[in-house]
Amino acid sequence: MDHAEVLLVGGRAGVGKTTVGWEVSARLRAAGVAHAVIDGDFMGQVHPAPEGDPHRSAIGERNLTAVWGNYAELGCRRLVYVNTVCVLEEATGMFRRAMGDGVRIVRVLLTATDETAELRLTGRELGSELEQELRGGVRKARMLDECAPAGTLRVVTDWRTVIDIAAEVTAATGWVPARVS
């Protein structure tokens, strides 16, 4: 394989992005498929935000470029990347700059109802940011639904096991023969 490929797993808070990303990784490992996993939420986690980069997108891209460079140096050509808004068309440039112009991009938008997301977040967010996550999640879910580009696979996560969801997501990549994915 001479070009890079990236699976982008996006969706609102509480939809299961990180959990699905790890399960996709488990499926790929079981099939012997070389890959790396990056949780994009960590790529821009610095406070205060760098001057001139209030949304931390520039520092996030710099970190992605550096980390991907290390993986690519090891021969890695496939990346599973999870982040709320990574499926949006605006993110395409970041992945092309970090991974090369020929990168193949597979976009998956995980979805869940407001009720499901609230239930999951209430169980997960034990600190001070629950209300912020709930409010932001509703807004981001609607924005992602409206703005995700054509060709983005939408995968419903309500009342499904992570194993079933990851099987559907993995199948979208074509990285694993159907009988194994």
Image: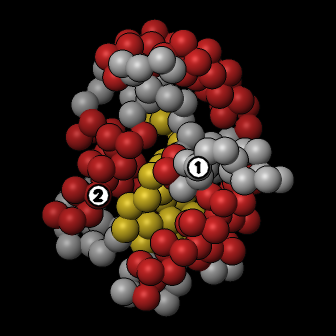
List the residue tagged with mark 2: 25
Tell me where residue 81 appears, x and y as whole percent.
47, 56
Please state which amino acid type lies under the numbered disc 2: Ser
Q: Is residue 3 visible?
A: yes
Frontmost residue, 95 versus 179 = 95
For the residues marked 2 and 1, what is the alpha-carbon distance in whole angstroms? Answer: 26 Å
Tell me where residue 20 appears, x and y as whole percent.
34, 43
Q: Is residue 168 visible?
A: no
Neighbor class of circle 1 (other Cα within 10 Å; few <14, some 14-19, many 20+) is few
Please state which amino acid type lies under the numbered disc 1: Val
In the rendered picture of this protein, how many numbered marks are placed on residues?
2
Frontmost residue, 165 versus 93 = 93
Q: Residue at x 47, y 23 (%)?
A: 112
Frontmost residue, 69 versus 49 = 49
Mark 2 or mark 1, whichever is nearer to me: 1
Tell me where residue 153 appears, x and y as whole percent.
53, 45
Instruction: Give left or right: position of 132 versus 122.
Output: right
Q: Residue at x 61, y 45 (%)?
A: 47
Neighbor class of circle 2 (other Cα within 10 Å; few <14, some 14-19, many 20+) is many
Frontmost residue, 128 versus 61 = 128
Rendered image: mark on residue 46: 1
| Quadrant in which the C terminus is drawn | bottom left
Residue lying furthest front: 48
Q: Residue at x 27, y 36 (%)?
A: 162
Badge 2 marks a residue whose secondary structure is: helix
With respect to residue 87, does 179 lie above or below?
below
Badge 1 marks a residue whose secondary structure is: loop
